[in-house]
Image: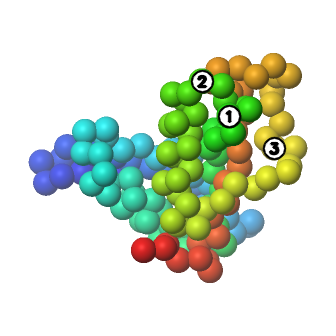
Amino acid sequence: VAENTRNRVYGFAILSHDPRLNFSYLDYLAADKEPVGRGIGGALYTRLREEASVLGSTGIFFECLPDDPALCRDPDVLSQNKARLRFYEPFGARPIINTAYETPVTPVVTIPPTWSSMIWDMTSSSPPVT
C-alpha cells in the first residue's frame, strides 16, 4: 500500500507467490490518478520486485491487455494498453509471445478484448533500468 502521513491511500498492489515453482504473480497494481507521474506506481512495482526476490521468485508473471491495433480497435483503450506496457518496460518486463495464452476467448475481436498477453519480469537477474 502506498499512503501518505495522513493515511490517505494513493495506490496498492496484490502479489501472489508460489514457493514450489519459485515465481510470483501480480494480480493487481493500481495508483491514484491525481498525482500522475509522481512515481507512486513505480515505487509500488519496485517494492513488489524486491518482495518477490526476497521470497525466492525467479520472476513475476502478470497480464496486460494487447497493444496491437489489430487486436484492440478502440483508440482510447489501445492508448491505455500501450501506456501500461511502457510503464513496465524499464523494469525489464516483456510480453511472452507466440503462445496459446494470448488466444482470444471468442473468435470475434471485442472491445475491450476478451484476452490478455502474459508478461514476464525476471526479477532475479534483471534490475530496474534507471
As measured in the structure, the alpha-carbon distance from the residue carrying label 2 to the one carrying label 3 is 22 Å
Q: Who is closer to the viewer here, 57 or 72?
A: 72
Tell me the element at label 1: loop
Q: Who is closer to the viewer here, 31 or 38?
A: 38
Query: Could you tell me how many numbered marks the image carries?
Result: 3
- The three-letter amino acid code for the residue at tag 3 is Tyr
Q: Residues within 10 Å of mark 2 (few under 14, many from 20)?
A: few
Residue lying at the far bottom in this picture: please name it.
125
Q: Quadrant of residue 33?
A: top left
As measured in the structure, the alpha-carbon distance from the residue carrying label 1 to the one carrying label 2 is 8 Å
Q: Earlier in the sequence, mark 2 or mark 3?
A: 2
11 shown above or below 108: below
- The three-letter amino acid code for the residue at tag 2 is Asp
- The three-letter amino acid code for the residue at tag 1 is Pro
27 shown above or below 87: above
Left or right for 21, reference 48? right
Query: Does the residue at mark 2 contact the one at mark 3 (Cβ under 8 Å)?
Result: no
Tell me the element at label 3: helix
Residue 26 visible in rendering: yes
Q: Earlier in the sequence, mark 3 or mark 1?
A: 1
Query: Does the residue at mark 3 contact the one at mark 1 (Cβ under 8 Å)?
Result: no
Q: Which residue is mark 1?
A: 69
Residue 101 image label = 3
Residue at 56% over, 44% down: 82
Residue at 24% over, 45% down: 35
Tell me the element at label 2: loop
| Camera-side mark, 3 or 1 | 1
Residue at 70% over, 54% down: 95
Q: Residues within 10 Å of mark 1 (few under 14, many from 20)?
A: few
Left or right for 80, reference 42? right
